[in-house]
Amino acid sequence: MEGRENQVILAVVKKEMEKVENAIKREKAILKNIDDITATLEHIAEQVEAGTEFPENSAYESYKDWETSAEKEVKSYNTSLETIDKYRSLLTAYQFYVKNNTPEV
């Protein structure tokens, strides 16, 4: 591969590595959000079981509406975690490429 072309590809791969690393760093925040929403779902179930009247000043129409919204959030966060798993594999490939295509100084 021509030296200049290799430098351009390396630069692109390194920039993509940085993006992937930043995405992977969000995993802990996503896991925390899942924990929070799971606690919310448990709270909703407790309120329904106790027969607690739904608050009038809520952003939701009902406990069911609130629960559906929370379940959608959990699903979205789980999709994000699946993407992060893919990013880990991609990061490994990027690291392999950089290691094997960086000229020794």
Image: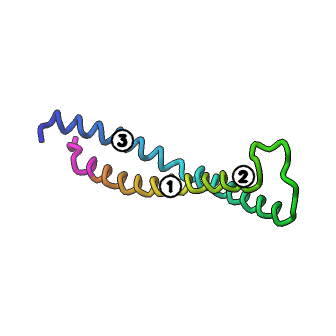
Amino acid type shown at disc 1: Thr
Relative placement, left or right, of 100 versus 82 is: left
Which numbered disc flags the more N-terminal residue, 3 or 2? 3
Image vertical order of residue 14 relative to residue 48, above or below: above
Residue 17 screen position, x and y as percent: 37, 44
Q: Nearer the viewer, residue 48 or 7?
A: 48
**Circle 3 crowding by C-alpha within 10 Å: few under 14, some 14–19, many from 20:** some
Relative placement, left or right, of 94 versus 56 is: left
Magenta residue span: 97-105
Which numbered disc flags the more N-terminal residue, 1 or 2? 2
Residue 74 screen position, x and y as percent: 60, 56
Amino acid type shown at disc 3: Glu
Contact between labelled residues 2 and 3, with CB atoms less than 8 Å apart: no
- Residue 79 disc label: 1
In the picture of the structure, the residue carrying the numbered disc 3 is 16
**Circle 1 crowding by C-alpha within 10 Å: few under 14, some 14–19, many from 20:** few
Relative placement, left or right, of 91 versus 47 is: left
- Residue 66 disc label: 2
